[in-house]
Amino acid sequence: TSAAMAAALSLGLRALLGARLRVPLRFAASGAAAPLYDVVVSGGGMVGSAMAAVLGHNIHFRDKKIALLEAGPRKEYDRMPDSFSNRVSSISPGSATLLSSFGAWDHVCSLRLKPFRRMQVWDACSEAMIVFEKDDLDDMGYIVENDVIMSALTKQLDAVADRVEVFYGSRAVGYTWPLPSRSCDTSPWVQIELDDGRRLQTKLLIGADGHNSVVRKEAEIKNIEHRYDQSAVVATLHLSEATDNNVAWQRFLPTGPIALLPLSDTVSSLVWSTSHEHARELLIMDEESFVDSINSAFWSNANHSDFIDTAGAMFRSAISLLKPSGTAVRQLPPSVAKVDPESRAMFPLGMGHATEYVQHRVALIGDAAHRVHPLAGQGVNLGFGDIACLAHHLSAAAFNGSDLGSLKHLLKFETERQRHNVSLITAIDVLKRLYSTKLAPLVLLRTWGLQATNALPPVK
Amino acid sequence: QLSLSRLTMKRLFSTSHSSVDSKEMKKFQLLAHKWWDEEGEYSALHSMNDIRVPFIRDTLLNMSSNYHLGNPLSGVKILDVGCGGGLLSEPLARLGASVTGIDPLEDNIRTADQHKSFDPVLDKRIQYKSCSLEEIVEESMETFDVIVASEVVEHVADLEMFINCCSQVLKPEGSLFITTINKTQLSYVLGIVVAEKIIGVVPEGTHEWEKFVPPEELERLLESNGFSVKTVNGMLYNPFSGSWSWMESTSINYAVHAVKLGAEGQSSQTDDLSEMESEQRSATAGTAV
């Protein structure tokens, strides 16, 4: 009893001191306890599904119970429809490795994907250009439709259905957090209430529910966020003529970057980040005008000024004196002939970063933890990187018999990923702002910067 | 009434032969509810799991040929002597073992029982009993595959009797794991003065230097009671990072793995296995390309 009194006193003290005592005490009557899972992943998009699949295929999770909550319906295709989806992702080789580690990449390859060998990025305000390609002409990355990735993940989740239970059409409407230091009778687990009234308990809750993450909000984790005054317009385009189409193109216009990502020898995906107004115009204009706008964006030199052109040319000849191989051959982007009807869509852009990725029994991954501008094609790859890191730490924790929700190993994941992510997210934000202007000094800076970077492999 | 009779039984035991020291018990009584605060008084024991659990797990895996990495200790019966609040019992049970945890202090057992009760898997795999080692000897002769006595022998009244009891409840060729503190000037300075009085990472008064056990003495007692000592490793605690690591020197903390000799004084299976392996190796050496 003295122990119980001491515990009650310390609880009371903590509440007085306003310590982070969260909304507790709505625990279920101890009679009918809600089913207890080792891990619950909230959000069944590409990142959430991959997280559940990676854990499900992990040898140290063989006897564990995992649940995946997805608000939408099940997505699986045996064959892709003839037309391409307008939502695609650039998958890095590292992400491909992760996906193949649990057998999903094979399914992607058997559906469809487009490897690309080269990336050409250039400025609309000058001739400055940078080309990325691997020395051995290996694949730099892959353009894959999001539906293809989802289908592959669904198949691999099915393969471990005895360990991973997927709740389709289910959304969590409430979370109840455990008290941090357990010295009394309350449940130590996270309580989850679903929209159909069902309840779950879990030792670790992983929030993969996107940039408006409910898990993050309910855990009261502060998020640094900023809405860009830009929207991205996506569409599926048909090229004027068939080509190898193994180059990804991106041109920085003052209004925002326009990118052409190859899907097949004749089809490419458009991602055009521009002002909200312009985006709306692009969506409602007729198909011919739309195609003209795209071709003009890639080919026109209207934004050049003589001053910048001269300065750029001077710098380029200086480089070719010092480093003869430092100026690459400029390839010409393909021209577009038509757009798939019904394939035009737009969505607003922003950036976000959670100040904490973890808390006792909670971890955030993917867009719930960090949201970036699509200009670098990094969004989903950052999420897959989160998965690889978290799975590594959870696997070690499981093999040590540890409590999966313990902050000790969750903090290791947070430190590793924040170290990696923060610099990349900042760089992408800086690039976005740097390229959003026509002002001569900044254009000159980025022109010379781009040319120099293209000439110097280490910087690149 | 029940608790009263248990109390008198305990008193009886402490006047006759017992490994339980009643003074020691009083010390732990006060902290019985603090076990599971990972940042509290027992934080060093929590972080010790990071080296003692892999040590036990890997030693047992190396000795066995029939295991699954998803459930490495499945089928292994473990006795956790001086289990306290169950800090070590729980990870071992999560790895698949059936664990019996014993501790002379009822409050500790109560804390341990309550903590495991919320996890149905642990609830099933762990049984806690409030008693001393001698009290279970009769009903548990040669019952356990493994005994762990972690941070216990430095609190025990009669070490030789303790080891003897371990031998009786352990199956032949079963493993005994001990972690404890050496009796050296260094362990006095670091283990008591610094740890208890200066940094306070161990509650004051927990340890008495007089009762620390040098590894040579522990080895001698083990070998003369039917054990073969296989491994002795030094352990080091870093109070700044709050983490443990292995080290060569056993001058402060150390861990021991010993195996109870089998029926004809045969040592553990590993010797037989390694003999077989070396035979195979020499047989195939000629055919290797």
Image (cartoon, rainbow, N blue to C red):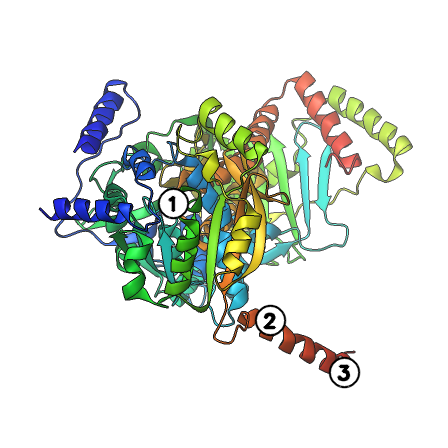
Quarter holding residue A441: top right
Instruction: Tell which of A91 and A204 is nearer to you.
Output: A204
Q: Secondary structure at mark 2?
A: helix
Could you tell me how far apart the alpha carbons at marks 2 and 1 are, in whole angstroms?
34 Å
Q: Which residue is mark 3?
A: B287
Q: Which residue is mark 2?
A: B271
Percent across and percent down for residue B204 are 40, 27
Question: Chain letter of disc 2?
Answer: B
Q: Amino acid at mark 3?
A: Thr
Percent across and percent down for residue B267 are 55, 70
Residue drawn at x 38%, y 68% is: B75
Horizontally, residue A16 falls left or right of residue A156, namely left
Q: Amino acid at mark 1?
A: Ala
Q: On screen, B12 above or below B275?
A: above
Question: Chain letter of disc 3?
Answer: B
Q: Amino acid at mark 2?
A: Asp
Q: Which residue is mark 1?
A: B157
Could you tell me how far apart the alpha carbons at marks 1 and 3 are, in whole angstroms?
59 Å
Q: Secondary structure at mark 1?
A: loop
Circle nearer the viewer, 2 or 3: 2
Label 1 Cα neighbours within 10 Å, binned few <14 / some 14-19 / many ≥20: some
Quarter holding residue A130: top right
Quarter holding residue A445: top right
